[in-house]
Structures are given as structure tokens and as C-alpha cells.
């Protein structure tokens, strides 16, 4: 009796040359997700600056290669090209008027566009996305077990933990949406635990959005209410009664929530936001084309990192770019919900929220899920996928 592998070989040999070529290209595009996630993971894992430069260059080139391959495979509709060239024009124009260098930002934008575009062509399976997310979470769980300080996991910041975890979950959501599968609730609970260990307040809230949003989408309202009730009880027990200070084994998971009590939404980010708003409101040119970073003392003090991706977007594209982006986001969310793609919409909402508290988008790793969601919506693929699913 012929084996399953021999049947596959027979089927493959029976394909035409064009069909084989299409199959190979589909496989190449399916590598976009694991390649992007792996490069972003290793990019800030090592302290050697030469390793960082090599991986950054490799990530940049890989995205541009995927962009060229995707363009030759299946040209995007004209709205995508108009969107891309508007971004390019605004970036070049604001670079001149605001004296902010946007060269690397432009290159990374098109590189991330390449990864996002490739995701549309090469359908990553939910099994592969699930496994790569498990590998990432397994790495973090090992760090938790050995008592590693989350500040020391990556060379940049502990906030990178939540950013790369959200990228992994977004890719998993995209795959589940294509296959019309429900995400694993257990996996999302592990993500929530890792984000609590990572301390960042924005990361913890992002985890809550992901967990409750998925439970509601999956019509698991009972589990959503049960989880919410348990979190309330745990919060009351641990913090309002100061129990957390007496249980040493769970203190690493409670620091982030304790920071909510101590800092609320205050901190350096609020000061940066206020000073940037003051800088652009007092100068019409800065409002239109982005404020020169040298003129914002709070940003200079943190090495030019505004800790807010929307400030980065304004610096990158000016007021017109921000307005265009807001319009695209609302349009994309409307199309995604109408096309019955709630997991993609949930990933987009989570990423947009997380982007408000760090420079993780607009030359950051969260660009890929944002661009994927927007391209899916405005290219017409969302509606076609909805028709196929129905």
C-alpha cells in the first residue's frame, strides 16, 4: 500500500511547471512570519553592537526582498501604492522642513511593508504560529523559573518583552482567522502571566485586552466573567490587604500591578507628551511638519526616544500623515468587522494601544501587524476572504 509521502510526491510530480513555481513561492512567503519574529527576537538579545548591526541589516534586507518578491508575484491594488507613495512623500518633505532625519525610517517602513505583504501571499498555518509563540513563551518561562530580572532579558528594555509577545500573538491571530479557528485560551493565559512578569503597565493592559477580547469573540462569556471575577478577587487579596509583600514567590508577578498603584498613568511619558504638544501648538510649522527633536528637551533627555509611536508618526509624516493614518485605521476596523475578521481587528486594536506607550511602531516591530491589517482591509482581500469563509 503506498505511503502518504509517496502519494504527495506523485501529486507534486503531476503538477505543471507553473503550479510548482506557485507552490514554491507560496512556501517562500510563508517564511515571512517566522523569519521576522526570529530576527526581531535575536536583534536585541545580545549586547554585542556588531551582532545588533548585522541582524538589523539582515532584517531590513529580508523585508525588502519580500517586498520585491510580493510585488512580482501579485501586484497590490493601486490604493496600496498610493498609500505607500504618500507616506514616502510626506516623510521626505518633513525630513527637510523639520530637520529630522527620516532616511532609516523610510527604509524600515518599506521593509516592514514587505513582511506584511508577504503574510498576505503566504498563509502561515495556525499550527506553526502556535508553535513559534510557544517557543517564545517557553524562553520567557525559563527566565521566570531561574529568577531572571526582566530588565536584563533584552539589551534595550523590559518593555520589549511585551512588544515581541504581542507580535507573536498577532501572527497567531492572523493564522487562526484565516483557518477560522479559535485561539488557545491556555496560551493567552500564559501570555498574560508573562506580561505581568515583564512589569510594564501598557503590556499588562494589552494582555487583558487580548484575553478578554478573545473570550468574547469566541463567545466564551462565562469564562470571561469568571476570569474577570478571579482577577478582581486576586487584586483585592494581594494589594488592598498587602498580602503580596508577604509572599516572596509571587512578588515578581506583582511588581507591574503595584506600579499602577504607585504611578497610575503619571511618569516620564506624560511629561514628554505634554512638552511635545506644547512645542507643536506654539509653532504652526512644527504642527504641520513635526517638531525638530532638538527643540524638545524631554525627548533629548531620553536619547531622542519619544516613548510614544504617535509622536514618532507625527515626526515622520507631519499632521497630514497622522490624519491619513487615523482615517485608514477607522476604515480598516470597519471593513474588518464587516468582513467578520474580529481576531485581526482585535490584534490591530491591541497593537495600536501598545504603540501609544513606546516607540514600537513607525520604525518598530509593531509596524508589521499594523500594515498587515490595513493592507488586508484596503486591498479588498478582507471582503474576498469573508466570502470564501461564508
Image: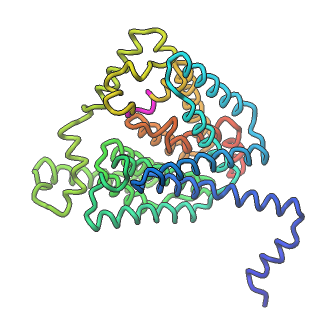
Q: Which percent across, then down, holds residue 278?
A: 35, 15
Image position of 261 with respect to 23: above or below:
above
Image position of 81 with respect to 259: above or below:
above
Viewer can see residue 258: yes
Q: Label the magenta part by its dominant secondary structure.
A: helix
Quadrant in the rendering for residue 226: bottom left
Nearest the eye: 252 or 7: 252
Image position of 127 with respect to 225: above or below:
below
Nearest the eye: 172 or 288: 288
Viewer can see residue 218: no
Quadrant in the rendering for residue 47: bottom left
Residue for point 37% across, 53% down: 154
Image position of 308 with respect to 191: above or below:
above
Q: Is residue 308 magenta?
A: yes
| Left or right of 244, for residue 317 | right
Looking at the picture, the colour scheme in use is rainbow
Residue for point 75% across, 43% down: 71
| Left or right of 26, for residue 245 | left
Q: Is residue 197 magenta?
A: no
Q: How many marks?
A: 0
| Left or right of 47, for residue 264 | left
Q: Which percent across, then down, holds residue 361?
A: 49, 38
Residue for point 42% across, 56% down: 45
The quarter of the rendered structure image containing the N terminus is bottom right
Nearest the eye: 25 or 223: 25
- Residue at the bottom extreme, as displayed: 1
Point out the stretch of residues depicted in magenta.
Answer: 307-311
Q: Which percent across, then down, holds residue 176?
A: 57, 56
Q: Which percent across, then down, holds residue 179?
A: 62, 58
Residue for point 56% across, 23% down: 321
Amino acid at each position: 500500500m503506498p505511503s502518504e509521502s509517496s502519494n504527495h510526491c506523485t501529486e507534486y510530480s503531476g503538477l505543471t511547471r507553473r503550479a510548482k513555481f506557485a507552490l514554491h513561492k507560496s512556501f517562500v512567503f510563508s517564511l515571512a512570519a517566522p523569519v521576522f519574529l526570529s530576527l526581531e527576537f535575536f536583534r536585541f538579545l545580545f549586547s554585542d553592537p556588531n551582532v545588533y548591526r548585522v541582524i538589523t541589516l539582515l532584517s531590513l534586507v529580508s523585508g525588502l526582498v519580500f517586498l520585491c518578491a510580493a510585488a512580482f508575484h501579485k501586484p497590490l491594488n493601486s490604493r496600496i501604492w498610493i498609500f505607500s507613495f504618500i507616506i514616502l512623500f510626506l516623510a521626505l518633505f518633513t525630513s527637510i522642513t523639520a530637520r529630522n532625519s527620516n532616511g532609516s525610517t523610510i527604509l524600515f517602513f518599506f521593509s516592514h511593508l514587505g513582511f506584511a505583504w508577504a503574510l498576505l501571499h503566504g498563509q502561515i498555518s495556525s499550527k506553526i504560529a502556535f508553535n513559534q509563540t510557544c517557543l517564545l513563551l517557553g524562553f520567557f518561562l525559563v527566565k521566570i523559573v531561574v529568577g531572571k530580572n526582566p530588565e536584563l532579558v533584552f539589551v534595550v528594555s523590559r518593555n520589549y518583552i511585551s512588544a515581541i509577545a504581542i507580535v507573536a500573538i498577532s501572527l497567531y491571530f492572523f493564522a487562526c482567522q484565516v483557518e477560522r479557528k479559535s485561539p488557545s485560551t491556555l496560551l493567552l493565559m500564559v501570555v498574560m502571566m508573562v506580561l505581568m512578569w515583564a512589569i510594564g503597565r501598557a503590556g499588562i493592559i494589552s494582555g487583558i485586552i487580548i484575553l478578554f477580547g478573545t473570550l468574547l469573540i469566541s463567545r466564551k462569556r462565562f469564562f470571561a466573567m469568571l476570569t474577570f471575577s478571579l482577577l478582581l478577587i486576586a487584586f483585592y487579596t494581594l494589594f488592598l490587604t498587602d498580602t503580596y509583600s508577604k509572599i516572596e514567590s509571587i512578588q515578581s508577578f506583582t511588581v507591574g500591578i503595584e506600579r499602577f498603584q504607585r504611578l497610575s498613568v503619571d511618569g516620564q511619558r506624560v511629561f514628554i507628551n505634554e512638552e511635545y504638544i506644547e512645542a507643536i501648538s506654539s509653532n504652526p510649522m512644527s504642527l504641520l511638519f513635526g517638531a525638530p527633536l532638538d527643540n524638545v528637551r524631554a525627548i533629548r533627555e531620553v536619547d531622542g526616544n519619544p516613548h510614544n509611536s504617535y509622536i514618532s508618526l507625527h515626526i515622520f509624516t507631519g499632521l497630514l500623515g497622522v490624519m491619513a493614518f487615523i482615517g485608514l485605521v477607522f476604515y480598516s476596523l470597519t471593513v474588518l468587522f464587516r468582513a467578520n475578521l474580529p481576531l485581526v481587528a482585535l490584534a490591530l486594536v491591541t497593537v495600536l494601544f501598545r504603540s501609544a506607550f513606546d516607540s514600537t511602531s513607525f520604525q518598530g516591530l509593531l509596524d508589521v501587524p499594523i500594515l498587515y491589517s490595513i493592507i488586508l482591509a484596503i486591498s479588498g482581500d478582507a471582503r474576498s476572504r469573508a466570502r470564501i469563509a461564508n
